[in-house]
Image (tube, rainbow, N blue to C red):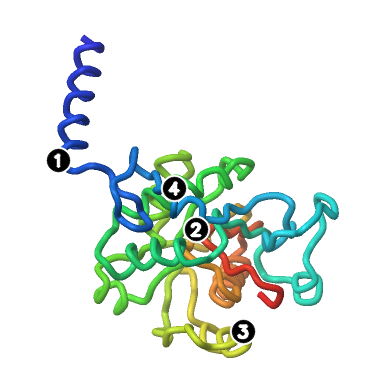
């Protein structure tokens, strides 16, 4: 019976692949399998890992030791405990995010979660997966919160508990693109809060906060501060891409 079901699934997959073959998430050309990039796009992706800053994940050119932090984190420690990203922000990473956010392609979240999954290893098994929230007006306009889609996909892959409404965005903030670090921090100040039930849930627990792109850290820091005020023991950040530059 099981072999028959497997064979039937294989036949359906072949039909779908013929009629709707998987596409490269970066450029849209036909790919070998789901979540697969074409060779051209794959070669332009810079996957992040060790060695890196123990706090913000900024890649190092050499290995200074397991607990070493970058100059920016030492000078001004962020509110979160650890941040990791699947890839460095570049042209292909940007294209994928734009497809997810503005082209009505929610399925792209599954691809992002596929590559982000490796950074979840080592997380507290009792950690709560939560997305960086969007204001309700932006959700109404876009139709969904891309970070929530990624968090849901990661929850299915990891088995971690997911709370898509853990943090509330109570202030509609202007777009942060083009603003500097300090200006961004001022814009998102007071934009996030947790309700009483959420405060009870996070008290003494770890939270893994999910987002699409990390730029200057203003949004991540504001969310982490809200979570820490609510009693969270630890706040880690995981995103698809992060900007890599000396002043990030």
SS for dot 3: helix
The residues bearing labels 2 and 1 have C-alpha atoms spaced at a distance of 30 Å
Nearer the N terminus, badge 3 or badge 1? 1
Residue found at the far front of this picture = 40
Can you give x and y, in whole percent of width and height, for residue 220 in the image? 56, 70
- Which is nearer the eye, 139 or 191? 139
Question: Would residue 197 be visible to someone looking at this image?
Answer: no
Q: Position of residue 47 (x, y in %)?
A: 58, 52
Q: Where residue 181 is drawn, which disc sits there?
A: 3
Look at 66% across and 75% down and name the residue there: 248
In the rendered image, which residue does mark 4 sit on? 39
Residue ID for mark 2: 240
Residue sitting nearer the eye, 31 or 69? 31
Q: Which residue is mark 1?
A: 19
Q: CA distance from mark 3 to mark 1?
A: 47 Å
Residue 180, picture quadrant: bottom right
From the viewer's side, name the closer residue of 25 and 231.
Answer: 25
Q: Residue at x 29, y 57 (%)?
A: 106
Sequence-wise, the earlier of marks 4 and 3 is 4
**Residue 42 locus on image (x, y percent):** 47, 50
> How dense is the environment of label 4, judged by Cα within 10 Å: few (below 14), some, or many (20 and up)?
few
Question: Along the polypeptide, which appears first: circle 2 or circle 4?
Answer: 4
């Amino acid at each position: 019976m099981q072999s028959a079901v497997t064979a039937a699934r294989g036949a359906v997959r072949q039909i779908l692949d013929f009629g709707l073959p998987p596409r490269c998430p970066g450029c849209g050309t036909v790919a070998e399998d789901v979540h697969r990039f074409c060779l051209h796009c794959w070669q332009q992706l810079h996957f992040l890992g060790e060695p890196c800053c123990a706090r913000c994940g900024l890649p190092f050119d050499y290995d200074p030791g397991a607990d070493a932090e970058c100059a920016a984190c030492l000078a001004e420690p962020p509110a979160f405990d650890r941040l990791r990203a699947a890839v460095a922000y570049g042209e292909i990473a940007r294209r994928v995010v734009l497809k997810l956010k503005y082209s009505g392609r929610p399925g792209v979240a599954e691809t992002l979660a596929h590559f982000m999954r490796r950074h979840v290893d080592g997380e507290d098994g009792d950690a709560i997966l939560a997305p960086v929230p969007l204001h309700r007006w932006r959700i109404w306009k876009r139709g969904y919160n891309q970070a929530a889609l990624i968090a849901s996909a990661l929850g299915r892959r990891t088995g971690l508990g997911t709370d898509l409404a853990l943090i509330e965005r109570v202030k509609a903030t202007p777009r942060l693109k083009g603003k500097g670090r300090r200006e961004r921090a001022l814009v998102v100040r007071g934009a996030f809060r947790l309700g009483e039930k959420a405060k009870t849930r996070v008290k003494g627990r770890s939270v893994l906060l999910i987002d699409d792109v990390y730029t200057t850290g203003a949004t991540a820091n504001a969310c982490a501060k809200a979570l820490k005020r609510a009693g969270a023991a630890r706040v880690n950040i995981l995103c698809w891409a992060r900007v890599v530059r000396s002043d990030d």
